[in-house]
Image: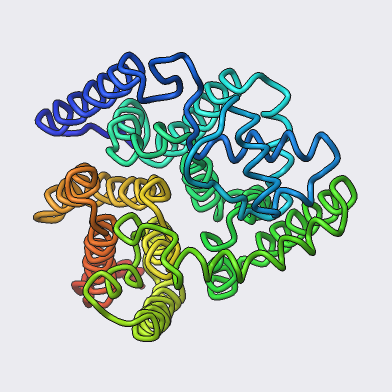
Amino acid sequence: MTPYRLSRPVELICFALCVAQLAYLAGSFVQGSWIVDPNGQLIATDFVNVWASGRQALDGAAGAVYDAVAHKQAEAAAVGHPFEGEYPWIYPPTFLFAAALLSCLPFLWAYVSWIALTFAAYVLAIRAIIGDRAGILFACAYPGNLANLLVGQNGFVSAGLIGAALLSLQSRPVLAGFLIGLVSFKPHLGILFPLVLLAGGHWRAIAAAAAMTGLLVAASSAVFGVETWQAFLHSVPAASQAALSEGRADLAKVQSIFAVTRILGGSIALAWTIQFLFAAMVAAILLAMWRSRISLHMKAAAFVTATLLVTPYLFLYDLVVLSVAMAFLLHAGQAEGQLRGEMAGIGCASLLILIFPLVKAPVGFAATFLVALLVLRRAWRELSLQARPRAFVPVPQAPRALL
């Protein structure tokens, strides 16, 4: 297959987005609003949560990461000063392995290393899907990157693992299963994997994913203690209740239909009802698509958008994962030709994510829903073409032998 090439206008837009994001990061650092403040003190962002948790684990107090008071003290010690707000640890103990490794480095170097390594993994995954220089340019230009870079979140890890797993599912199912097992550090982004793997009959991937997940659970229990898992399981309902039902999370930052319902004035009960009904509908459509004869790339794009739509707890930095669905759409366009308005739709979704700092609303949900519609349209086209009867071509018969 020839290398994928973006059109010249799209290339220029991507290049401009790359430059704009780099300029914003550089300006934020110079002005003292990113990493280090004007007084030279470290700024507490989401990454302080990771580094402080790793430090607690190395100090033999892994279970304390789920104690809000003890964890906040560890975070203040990490940046060297008290600060307002809180960054609770809500991940399973398996993610403490990465946190502990990072906390072996000084905070600033750990932050830079985390961003550099995870960003590289994400870019490699997108490049593998799209191919060649266009994949690298698209990955670097994607406007959802900035939200992840500014706070040191794990969106690049999620996107890299999910993208690589879906891309490897057919050719290297065991590798795909191992990668899916690693996604278990963020369970709400992997909840649909069992559904689609069973629907597609990917038994080797299922076995590998189960083995990797079980290994991580066993290893984390042995290293950090079974009581750490007990603390995690006890903290999950309380953390979910506090973030969504009690409103500790800014609903304008939550990119789900739950948040949309609450912002529009719906009650908590109504928001949960709509979320569950919507998630069930999305899951049913996804199951039908994975049992159909559409291409694996379109199934992958559908899976990514469905994953982002069914979870009530989703922030803008998680929407780095949406770039994976866009990449699979671009790959399909490379093989079969772009559909009318497809690039414009991807552009509109990117614009919605780009304007989030200006509007502070669940525009990410709208972007995800728009990409999902693009995926459905292309999948429907694939099914329509498969159902279309082929033109009859008479088979020439060999001449009869002369008697």
* Image quadrant where residue 37 sits: top left
Q: What quarter of the picture does the C terminus occupy?
A: bottom left
Q: Can residue 158 be seen in this view?
A: yes
- What residue is shown at x 54% (from left), y 75% (from top)? 199
Residue 342 coordinates in the image, percent (x, y): 16, 53
Does 207 sit above or below residue 182? below
Residue 64 coordinates in the image, percent (x, y): 76, 49
State how many labels appear.
0
Q: What quarter of the picture does the N terminus occupy?
A: top left
* Image quadrant where residue 15 sits: top left
- What residue is shown at x 50% (from left), y 53% (from top)? 166
* Relative depth, front residue between 79 and 96: 79
Q: Is residue 143 left or right of residue 162?
A: left
* Relative depth, front residue between 401 and 1: 1
* Image quadrant where residue 74 sits: top right
Q: In this view, does 31 lie to the left or right of 166?
A: left
- What residue is shown at x 30% (from left), y 49% (from top)? 326
Residue 2 coordinates in the image, percent (x, y): 30, 33
Q: Tell me, what colour scheme is on the image?
A: rainbow
* Relative depth, front residue between 68 and 163: 68
* Relative depth, front residue between 334 and 325: 325
Residue 254 coordinates in the image, percent (x, y): 36, 59
Does 349 sit above or below residue 403? above
Q: Can residue 176 be seen in this view?
A: no
- What residue is shown at x 9% (from left), y 55% (from top)? 340
Please identify the residue farthest to the right as the structure is shown. Answer: 222
Does 59 sit above or below residue 205? above
Q: Is residue 341 left or right of residue 392?
A: left
